[in-house]
Image: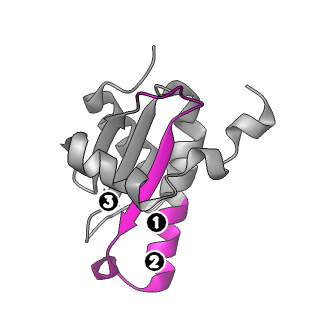
Amino acid sequence: MTGGERRFGPDARLGSRRDFQRPFALGRKFTARNAILWAYRRQEKARGARLGLSVSARLGTAVRRNRLKRLAREAFRLNRASLRPESDLVVYLRPGCRWQALADAERDLRDLCRKAGLLEL
């Protein structure tokens, strides 16, 4: 994998409203203590898994919400290569999310992806 493929660039994000709505409407839902994952398998030719984040103001201050979003994006970026390339993921961070470090976010994201059958072996 080249350095460009390990970035969290535009090709790794769900950008449009339609991209976000598809996993909610047509995907499957998986839950964990700190997050909820909606997963959808795209039909078009896939260049890699994509991530969208949904964070409620009830999660805390803007500083806290932004920190948790950074942790989620980094956990996704580090594990993107092991996910099925046609996957669209929307992660909702639950109020009371207790992530303190990247390891916490990575553990929860991998567990949710394992439940969803998105990890390639």
**Residue drawn 32% across the image and 75% down it:** 56
Task: Determine which residue is flagged by label 2.
Answer: 64
Q: Residue furthest bottom?
A: 61
Task: Name the spot of residue 32 as percent of width and height, x first.
Answer: 23, 48
Q: Which residues are magenta?
A: 43-70
Is 46 in front, or is 104?
46
Give how far across and how far down residue 63 sits, in percent.
Answer: 51, 82
Q: Position of residue 65 (x, y in %)?
A: 44, 75
Q: Is residue 37 magenta?
A: no
Residue 45 or 83: which is nearer the viewer?
45
Spatial CA distance of label 1 from label 2 is 6 Å
Residue 72 image position (x, y, % from top left): 48, 55
| Image marks 2 and 3: residues in contact by CB distance under 8 Å | no
As for residue 63 lying within the magenta part, the answer is yes
Which comes before the other along the chain, label 2 or label 3? 2
Of the residues shown, which amino acid type is indicated by label 2? Arg
* Cβ–Cβ under 8 Å for marks 1 and 2: yes
Q: Look at mark 1 in the image and give the residue it sits on.
A: 68
What secondary structure is marked by label 3?
strand
How many numbered marks, from 0 up?
3
Left or right of residue 92, residue 61 in this image = right
Q: Nearer the viewer, residue 16 or 69?
A: 16
In terms of secondary structure, where does tag 2 sit?
helix
> Between marks 1 and 3, how big is the CA–CA gap?
11 Å
Q: Name the N-terminal-most of marks 1 and 3.
A: 1
Q: Looking at the image, is 91 positioned above or below residue 61?
A: above
Dot label at residue 92? 3
